[in-house]
Image (tube, rainbow, N blue to C red):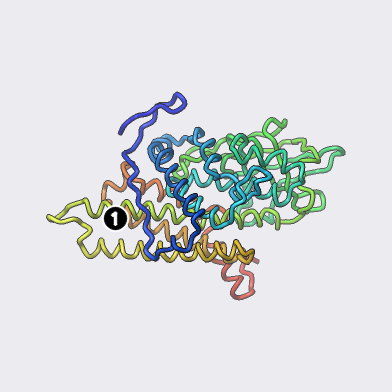
Amino acid sequence: MATTTVNGTVTKSVGQDKFQAHDYYQIDELLSEEQLLIRDTVRAWVKKEVSPIIEDYAERAAFPAHLIPGLGEIGAFGAVIPQKYGGMGLDYMTYGIIMQELERGDSGIRSTASVQSSLVMFPIWKFGSEEQRMKYLPKLATGEMMGCFGLTEPNHGSNPAGMETRIVDNGDHYLLNGAKMWISNAPFADIGVVWARDEEGKVRGLIVERGMEGFTTPETHGKWSLRASATGELVFDNVRIPKENIFPEIKSLRGPLTCLSSARFGIAWGAIGAAMDCYDSALRYSKERVQFDRPIGGFQLTQKKLAEMITEITKAQLLAWRLGVLKNEGRATPAQISMAKRNNVDMALKIAREARQIHGGMGITGEFPIMRHMMNLESVITYEGTHDIHLLITGHDVTGLSAFK
């Protein structure tokens, strides 16, 4: 491996990114010229900026913060936010395509962009005051300011209705107390979009700024997944929240759940990128690796794996494309988004495991992206709605009967 110096840190770089996209059903023909141009721009950026250094950062469990300005430049932050607020004003399909290309590079990089876009910028745009939009969104769009999203708590993951974090009206401000955990971007975020119950028990959204007394963000260490992503906690000890930092209208769980639907949409697309990377690597390796005097790609069991991989990727691509059409038309339901998130992440994880087998022993090394994707996807299949919870969301939708209570 070659070494390079990034911001004074010596990093190891892998070989050339040889990724080639696979479009078995000519789905590119369903995309606009603008969508294809943006896709190719993001793909080229990932090949140049992410692929050469990501294995090293994942191995060191370090977040490549130097990539943040570049993510802003390619429109990865706030793609659907109107240009008035610094966004690109793009459609949801294009947002999904961007997430696909970023996760092809690494799930952690996609998570950083997904949180910034769907869980920080989106709620400020959707639920915030005009003053909040103008104050925060332009800087969030460029990456000059980074954000995180505080919903999950130590005692409440799949059941956000059990939220214990509280705000109390204290005259000209609120006092915030509680804790959130498993928060992407928390260790370096400048602001947090946080959800808490008020004295009437209603769920309120608010913006917490780094530097507010009593607000700390301890980092989570020891992760074997999303190692190139920064994860931490949000701890609130009598934090004074100015009243102008409260979202003025939203007063229910509909607020955070609407944000999660937007983020899950991006994950449904992003997981396809990870699957494509694993498949492409396995296909190439199967043609190069010779055993018994012939490439292993010529053996029936290897071809079975590869044929099933490209079939499942194609099905996921079509599912995401149709969901993108419905999302652009304002007709995509949360249950439809749940189905796509669950299916596509499960598909990607299975493909990563099969790709590891095709690579044999080499599949566990950093010479190939397989194990990194596989470990990352173990988090993606759980966060923003676990695999089983999304199954029950579909079950509820088709039967009309809730299995949660």
Q: How many marks?
A: 1
Is residue 133 shown above or below 320? above
- Dividing the picture into quadrants, the one containing residue 324 is bottom right
Residue nearest the viewer, comparing 265 with 223: 265
Q: Position of 28 compared to 85: left or right?
A: left
Is residue 392 shown above or below 155? below
Q: Tell me the quarter of the image containing the N terminus.
A: top left
**Residue at x-position 64% and y-position 64%:** 330
Look at the numbered disc 1 and give the secondary structure of its residue: helix
x, y percentage for residue 90?
Answer: 59, 52
The amino acid at mark 1 is Leu
Query: From this viewpoint, which residue is outermost toward the left?
Result: 293
x, y percentage for residue 179?
Answer: 66, 42
Q: Tell me the quarter of the image containing the C terminus.
A: bottom right
Query: From this viewpoint, which residue is outermost toward the top?
Result: 8
Residue nearest the viewer, comparing 40 with 268: 40
Query: From this viewpoint, which residue is outermost toward the front?
Result: 33
Q: Residues within 10 Å of mark 1 (few under 14, many from 20)?
A: many
**Residue at x-position 40% and y-position 64%:** 26
Query: From this viewpoint, which residue is outermost toward the bottom?
Result: 399
**Residue at x-position 62% and y-position 64%:** 329
x, y percentage for residue 79?
Answer: 58, 49
Can you identify the residue that label 1 sits on?
Answer: 283
Q: Position of 169 compared to 106: left or right?
A: right
Q: Position of 20 compared to 141: left or right?
A: left
